[in-house]
Image: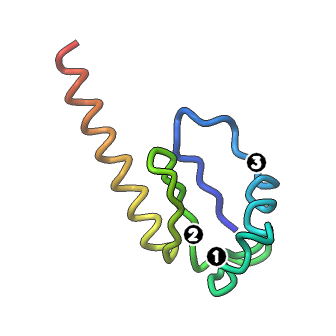
Amino acid sequence: MTLYKCCRCTPEFRASDYLVYIQHPAVSPFLAHYDLGTSDRKAQHTLILDREQHQLFIAPVEEAELFLREQWLESQVKNDQSSKYL
């Protein structure tokens, strides 16, 4: 299981919170067909939470990593551009 903490404004993420969520009876049936990994085995899929839109996505690990990398590159470019005017 790979956990990513990608939002600067969130409190510290705990793996126990993640496990409670994915094992919840209302959630787990929707995740049954995906391999989210374990502490002993790498995941094939990753959950991505969009906190602004209140949406949860699932993607293959490679796609999720690319999405997150691009998201933070865009954020860095915006920050670099805005710091030019300070």
Q: Quadrant of residue 15?
A: bottom right
> Left or right of 28: which side holds 78?
left
Q: Quadrant of the N terminus?
A: bottom right
Provide the residue designation for mark 2: 46
Pair 1/2: label in front: 2
Mark toward the start of the polypeptide (1 vs 3): 3
Q: Amino acid at mark 3?
A: Arg
Provide the residue designation for mark 3: 14
Q: Under tag 3, what secondary structure?
A: loop
Q: CA distance from mark 2 to mark 3?
A: 16 Å
C-beta proximity under 8 Å, tags 2 and 3: no
Query: Which of 78/18 is in front?
Result: 18
Q: Quadrant of the C terminus?
A: top left
C-beta proximity under 8 Å, tags 1 and 2: yes
C-beta proximity under 8 Å, tags 1 and 3: no
Residue 38 rendering spot, x and y as whole percentages: 76, 73
Q: CA distance from mark 1 to mark 2?
A: 7 Å
